[in-house]
Image (cartoon, coloured by chain):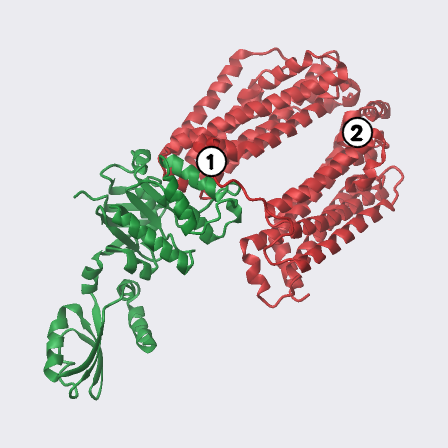
Chain colours: A red, B green
Amino acid sequence: MTGTATFLRTFLRRDRWMIFWFLVGTTVLYWSQAVSVDGLYTTQAEFDKAAATMRDNTAFIAMAGPPRALNTTGGQVTWQAAAFGAIVVGLMVMFLIGRHTRAEEESGREELLRAAVVARTAPMTAALLTAMIASAIVGAGVTGSLIAYGLPAAGSISLGVGLFLFGCALAAVALLAAQLTSSTRATYGLTGAVIGVAYGLRAIGDVSGGGLSWVSPIGWYQSMHAFSGERWWPAVFLVVMAGLSGVAAYAVFDRRDYGAGVLATRPGPDRAPASLRTSLGLAWRLQRPSIVGWTLGVFLGGIGYGSIGDDVNSVMGDSQYSHDIFGAAGPNLVDSFYAVAVLMLVLIASGFTVSSALRPRAEEDAGRVESLLATALPRRRWFLDHLAVTLTGTLLVMLAAGLGIGVGYALVTGDGGAVGRLTGATFAQLPGVLVLGGLARLLTGFVPRWAIAAWLAVAFCVVVLLFGEVLRFPQWVVNVSPFSHLASVPADTMAWGPFVAVAALAVAISTAGVIGFGRRDIR
Amino acid sequence: MDSVIDIQDLVKTFGTTRALDGLDLQVTPGEVHGFLGPNGAGKSTTIRVLLGLLHADSGAVRLFGGDPWKQAAELHRRLAYVPGDVNLWPNLTGGEVIDLLGRLRGGIDEARRADLVERFQLDTTKKGRAYSKGNRQKVALVAALCSDVELLVLDEPTSGLDPIMESVFQECVDVFRDGGGTVLLSSHILAEVERLCDRVSIVREGRVVESGTLAQLRHLTRTSIHAELASPATGLDGLPGIHGLVAEGTRVDFEVDTDSLSDVLAKLTSIGVLTLTSQPPTLEELFLRHYGDEVVAESADVQEAAR
């Protein structure tokens, strides 16, 4: 075990910010559920009514988990946060393990370290311990914040301990994946698939009432029944999973060569397909996985929103916050709710647009542009090809968002016309999304070092949407968000004037960005 | 004949750093031109300006007689470039990258592609992320060499190749030159430059401090002489152009300025020469002369000891 302690110290030091942000994010995920639930419902009767509605909503159950004690704050926190908290912690340990094991080996750096006076297993043991410590920190953060908020200690501890054990189990799985595969990407793919399957199995199990939740680690976590009659024995499953995966990881490690995996890497094509003849083809090929992922993601998210159907009234309660964000209750509440839901989904979709608009910058940063621009490819053409892909992708993702929310609504209410209406409502927000993408392009063209700041604009728009009314932001602050100028369909009627004006702004700043990029030095 | 590359008084600054400080460079058609200098001397910056990736602050830069900034794409049809740091797309195979770059340049020679892949022993079905540095470089080399171009711009192209692949590379450059092509080869591997280049420019701190054929440059430096004479040497140390004279009985070791070589040889002959070895200056000595004069003496001593 020589060297393990040294590695562990180094890893923790390198990861301290990453762990800190996961701690903050996960803690806020749990804690904010408690805050928002208590803010949403002012009386227990209201709360009971909402809980009864949610309990019968299959889509909610599929998304979140088994409905238990939904008319209590603790029950709501568990229901709304546990599955997603587990996914977040799963991703955290996956990244921690991946970057200290397979990524180091892939880059060749580990060769240097292993040649030093250290035990062969020292780096992987240190990586495992790092992930376990990070899980413990996050679990403690969740428990601590919930107790501090005033929720019962037993339930808070159950949520934190379960999260810690889930983190350990997934860390061991990631460690095994890092031994089986021979690239970091494949390690992440395999571990991500385990998390995805775990989520899917419990979704089916929770909805059908069958036993499938019992073969999912997320299901085990939720079956600890935090805040609704805690039971501790399901934790044993998580411990056993961690132990078995860990032992398997060390066994495989012992039998494989340095740099190799167990699963064979598939060779790719020897020749480029015809579609890879142009820089447009290349841009499409590079961005395709992200377009597919985002399209699927917002479609499912849309179905989630849409499947609330017309139950908006009871779910949203009658609190001041509901009033502020959705306007007055009444016959228009459903429309108001969907106007906000559409905008929320559109803001999520704008994540695709911004990341895609930043892709040229990322390519430049990775040093992959030089070779391209040293061919007969004009640089503006290259930039415009990426722009075309961003635009196409944005349209696809927006369409998926609109269809998702429309189909979800139509399935629950039987109102087929909603598909067209809600898809139209989604596209009413398109110019705002294009402004955010244009901003990323403008920054790339003139101050490439700060291009990443385009994400701040997205965050700003989200904050204005969620808190602008509640915290009574000054009007000029609200007006900075392009979405504040667009008609909030279906609550408002479509207004073409602002639509065209905001779209024109998007075109103007995009054009400026393209011109700027044509004039500046390539890194 | 017009120069393929003609750079005059080129200046490029990054913030307060003056990366290029009045650099001049001429490359004539059909020559292999060595571009020598340590890291940070300005080689890659020069090449990037030449490719229209960076905008020159001042100075005149002509590539095939055109403006590399304004006519970049059209001029690039006539050249191929291998960057010093080859970065490939992680999920494209080497073969796909070769085809893509070739097509963007205006087409590839299929027979030559197959031949090069074979000679460089490149597995073209691997994904970009799976290649080692040397193999990434091979991908870029094959992509560059399989197009029909007039100029190759190579930025330290062999830093990751093993000696066998390096010799394959040298053969490829020979073939390209025999076909009438021009090469700008940036390097700090002196043996490679000595083996391949017709002319050499040495860069230091953003300027070319020495430029010419290897023969011309050798002229600027000293030849080492080891000789055994018929009788003890006298009067040698008085001759102009002699340095580091060590005389032990009838044996002498010294260095002589190339300009004084014939006077010194006449003197030796007059004493009577039994054996004589002369060592022409290596590029290494040329190079070191421009980089830290204090290193030169030391390194000469080391070389002596090694012999």
User: Does residue A289 appear left or right of residue B271 in this picture?
Assistant: right
Residue sitting farthest toward the right: A229
| Of A13 and A165, the residue lying toward us | A165
Q: CA distance from mark 1 to mark 2?
A: 40 Å
Q: On screen, B276 above or below A413?
A: below
Which residue does the image show at 29% across and 56% down from the upper left?
B196
Q: Against B127, is A282 above or below?
A: above
Left or right, B127 with respect to A373, comes to right
Chain letter of the residue beneath label 1 in the structure image:
A
Q: Secondary structure at mark 1?
A: helix
Residue tagged by mark 2? A61
Kindly tell me whether residue A472 is visible in this rendering.
Answer: no
Residue A156 horizontal/vertical position (percent) = 81, 42
- x and y percentages locating residue B289 in the rendered image: 27, 65
* Label pair 1/2, CB-CB below 8 angstroms: no
Query: Is label 1 on the same chain as label 2?
Result: yes
